[in-house]
Amino acid sequence: MDSGLLVWGVSGVLFLVGGAFLVLRRQLIAMIIGVELMINAANLALVHAAVRRGDAEGLAAALLIIAAAAAEAVVGLWLVLRRLRDGETAETDSLRELSG
Amino acid sequence: MSAPWPIWVLFGAPVAALLVGYFYCHQRCPERTHWPILASCAATALAALWLAFQVYEGAGWDFIVYRWAAIGGFTVDFGVRLDGLSASVLAMVCVVSGLIHIYAVGYMEGEPGTSRFFLYFHLFFLSMLGLLVSNNYLQTYVFWEGVGLASFLLIGFWYPKESARRASWKAFLTNRVGDIGFILAIFLLLREAGSVRFEEVFARLGNITPGMRMTIGLLLFWGAAAKSAQFPLHVWLPDAMEGPTPVSALMHAATMVTAGVFLMARSMPLLESAPPVLAVITVAGLITAIGAAIVSVSKRDLKRILAYSTVSQLGLMMVAIGTGNLVGAVFHLITHGFFKALLFLCAGSVIHGLHSSLHGAVSAGVDDAGGLGRDLPYTGGAFLVGALALSGVPPLAGFFSKDLILEGALESGHGLAALTFLIALGSSLYIFRMLLLTFFGARAQQRGPKAHAHEPGLLMRVPVLILAVLSASAGVFGGTVARMLGFQPPHFVLGVAVSGTLVAAAGFGVAYFLTMSRPSFDWEWRARFPWLERWLECDFGWQKATDAIAGGGAALAHFVAGAWESRRWDPFTESLATGCVQLGEGLSAVCRGRLNEYVWWMFVGAAALAFTVLLCF
């Protein structure tokens, strides 16, 4: 089996799993994990494509995304921590202010 | 040749003065806004005189300062062209502007909003400079609009007055009508010659068909006719007298309205390559000059007499352009700038002196005046100098310039010369009528000043004195102007000079007979022929016709706005808006406040978007 297909497949499965986490899990930390999975799925595809094309643009983009993902994780976890400190739960059912 | 630094003074000083004037003085000390502006006037006047002298000595500049945009071969440039034409007119404009700025300090003292006045006034001055030194049609057009804007703002300076607001709109809209011609001419030049730069356009005239040259020339004249108040677009200038007198003097007499003549002089190579255009200009100039001279004789308001006189003199300059007499037109433009500014400033001094008798009116008529020579000897003397210069009595300035135009007309034909002499007769008649009615003898119908009218202060008297000296002596610059324009000094034709002087004397004689020998004539004919006065009041009916045209346009606009906009178009746009609101309200049912659902809808949206993109590309 072509190794490229394997990488694409892993990337796609990671993306879908991450998406499923986001849609199905009701815990905020689990949702953040889902986001991380999706980001890394995209990164994997990006690095793979860059290597195949033989240029550095994809690699540079992947590095930038890692930095952005780290920052995003910090902000997300801090928000969750704030809620827990205020004595709230980290369940999405407790966040209903966004209803239209 | 690299550009000398006075050229930068020409723009730098007014721009700096306006910035300081607006951002510092206008905010902190509005009673001193004129200080930086007067300093800028002094600097630009010196720079302009120095540059004019350099050009007289043979220098000349034509360069691009800043390329604003380039689209293919078409460029939008800010350039400077200083040749004999722009340098000579520039010198006159800067000197007259400086003097009128000083006069305005005295005239506007105690008025509310003087700070705003000086900023507008100097904005006009800056635009006029940009117009004069421009080296392409597009830049000319931009500053052409700039002076038009300043004119609009200053005619409506006393905006609480309904008549001032109406006059400013009339001026602006009439000029827009002319601007259409100007901008169409620029478009055609761009298509036919591939450039809007003067020297390139004139070098490529041979590539343009005669019919197209004629079209462009006529469109340019259409634009110039609006700015220089030529029939049929002259209607705005008399109403423009609603502005303060220094505005009338500087913009609506000495400088801005001559921009049209300047444009024609600038386009002379183009016009000469299309003789029918020259004929049209001559005829329009003749109609304007004769008609305005007749109307001027019938007017009672001091500033309106002078306004129609300006229209008439501009017509005379157009006649000179039409006969190919470039030196005559430009020289008359310059001398007219001096003596018409002088006459307007004297009228301003009269209004200023009569202030207490006018009950707050901003202008005075001959009914308010009468025998003012005793109270205002200084102003009366200066007005006499201006009147002599205007009517063309030797050796004052107007004699030499009018003489040149008469000679040019004589070369073109005896009929034309006879009509031009008629204009000269008319100008002598109306100006001496005004002089005698205002300053000499008191008539039973004239109210005169209640208390003694007073002479204005030094700030207003000194500019008048300098302008009087210039009006008397500017005739000596005839040879200078001719040389700067690249012509031989004008030769002196004794017959024309003598007959011109005789015509001026005849005009004086008639005016003397009608105002002094029969003092009440001016009121008698009005009582006996009221229809004639009404007819002259609306410029032989033309003012009424333009009012009808403008009124028709306004009625059409109202109809379209009422019948189409509000009944047909508004319901459609409103239903679009309410539809959007309803759609949003319906979709908001989806938003139940569950984060996971939102993520789900996000995925659905992204998938739909990706699917659409894949499908379309």
Image (tube, helix red, strand yellow):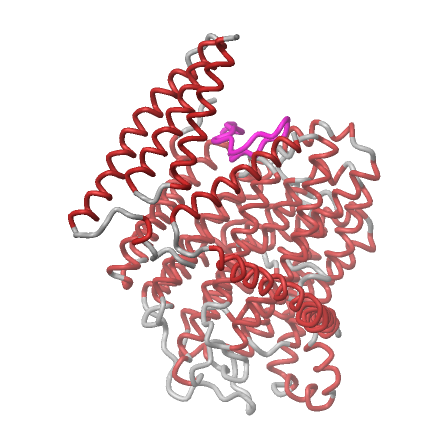
User: Which quarter of the picture shows residue B509?
Assistant: bottom right
Picture residue at 43% right of the left edge, 35% below the top? A19
Range shown magenta: B57-82
Which is nearer the eye, B457 or B557? B557
Quadrant location, the C terminus of chain B? top right
Picture residue at 29% right of the left edge, 34% below the top? A72
* Residue B169 against residue B597 in the figure, above or below: below
- Describe residue B107's horizontal placement relative to residue B411 as left or right: left
In the rendered image, residue A7, in percent from the top left (x then y), is placed at: 46, 15
- Describe residue B327's horizontal placement relative to residue B380 as left or right: right
User: Which quarter of the picture shows residue B118?
Assistant: bottom left
Does A10 appear in magenta?
no
Which is nearer the eye, B599 or B297? B599
Which is nearer the eye, B267 or B469? B267
Residue B555 in sight in this render: no
Residue B354 in sight in this render: yes
Considering the whole magenta stretch, tell me its main secondary structure.
strand
Picture residue at 68% right of the left edge, 77% below the top? B537
